[in-house]
Amino acid sequence: MQDAVLEINNIEVIYNKAVQVLRGLSLRLPRGQIVALLGSNGAGKTTTLKAVSGLLALEDGEMTRGSVVLDGVDTARLKPHELVRSGLFHVMEGRRVFEDLTVEENLVAATYALTGRRATSADFDLVYEYFPRLHERKRGLAGYLSGGEQQMLAIGRALIARPKVMLLDEPSLGLSPLLVENIFTIIARINREQGVSMLLVEQNASVALAVAHTGYIMETGKVVIDGPAEKLAGDPDVREFYLGMA
Ligand code: ATP
C-alpha cells in the first residue's frame, strides 16, 4: 500500500461539550493523491478538516477520541501554526483572504506564516504561472477581486508556501460552472506537477470525483463508502443514494 501523508484514525468530535458531530471517522490520504470527502450538508466534512488543522478549539470543538497523523507524526500536541510549519495548509471555506491587502501582500503574508521566510521571486512566479489572473491584479486590493479571483488567491496563498498537504474546503462554492471547471483544472495540475497531496471537501461531487484519485462519502459523522473515485462516480447506486446525482 502506498504510504499515507495524512491519516485520520477513528476520530470523534464534540462541539460545546454537547453536540457530537464526528462519530469514529477514519480516512487515509496517500502521498501525492487527491482524496475527495463528500456528503450532504451537515455531514461533518468541514469539521473533519478543522480537526486536522487544529482549528476546532476556536469554535469550542474538541476531538475526544482518535488521532490525526501527519507524515508519521501524531498532531495532538502541535498548535495550528506548528502544523502549518509542518507543511499543512487549510484553504478555508468562503475564500478567507485579507481584503485590505493587495494580492501580492496576501501572498507575502502566507509565505511568512508557513515558512517564516520571505517569498522569493520564484515563489511568486510559481503562483502566477498557475493563476495568470492574479499576476494581472497583483497590486489590486484583494477585497475588489471577483469571487473566482478570490478563490484563486486563497489557493495561491496555499501554493506559495509549498505545503505537503492542502486541505481544500468547497473551492466550487458560489462560482459559475465555467469557473469551477477552470479552478479544478488548476487544482489537478498543482497536484500533478507540484506533488501536493490534497484532501478536498466538496458538495459538487462530480467535479471532485473527476480530479480525485479516491473518494470518501460521509453521513452523520462517519464514512459510509469509500473507493477509487472513478468507481464511485460510475456506480449508479452511489450516485443516486449518496451523491444526489441522476
Ligand atoms: P456544510 O457543507 O454545510 O459545511 P459539513 O458536512 O461541512 O456541511 P460541518 O460544517 O462539519 O458539516 O457541520 C456538521 C455539524 O456540526 C452540523 O450539524 C453543524 O450544525 C454542527 N456544527 C458545525 N460547527 C459548529 C460549531 N461551531 N458549534 C456547534 N455545532 C457546529
Image (cartoon, grey):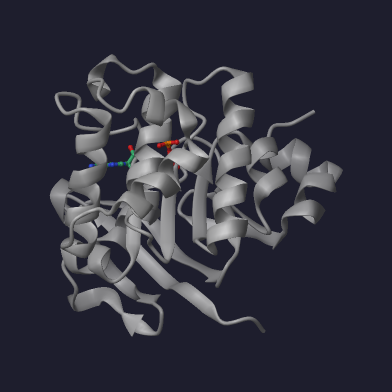
The answer to whether residue 112 is left or right of residue 87 is left
Quadrant for the N terminus in the image? bottom right
Q: Is residue 205 left or right of residue 89?
A: right
Query: Can you name the residue that lies furthest to the front here?
Result: 121
Residue in the image at 85% along x and 42% along y: 236
130 or 172: which is nearer to us? 130
User: Number of callouts in the render?
Assistant: 0
Q: Residue at point 74% right, 31% down?
A: 245
Q: Quadrant of the C terminus?
A: top right
Q: Quadrant of residue 103?
A: top left
Q: Position of residue 243 (x, y in %)?
A: 68, 38
| Figure quarter occupied by ligand 1 | top left
**Residue 38 is at least partly visible in this image:** no
Does residue 148 lie above or below 187 as drawn? Answer: above
Percent coordinates x, y for residue 99 in the rendering: 20, 25
Q: Is residue 101 above or below residue 116?
A: above
| Side of 137 relative to 110 (left or right) | right
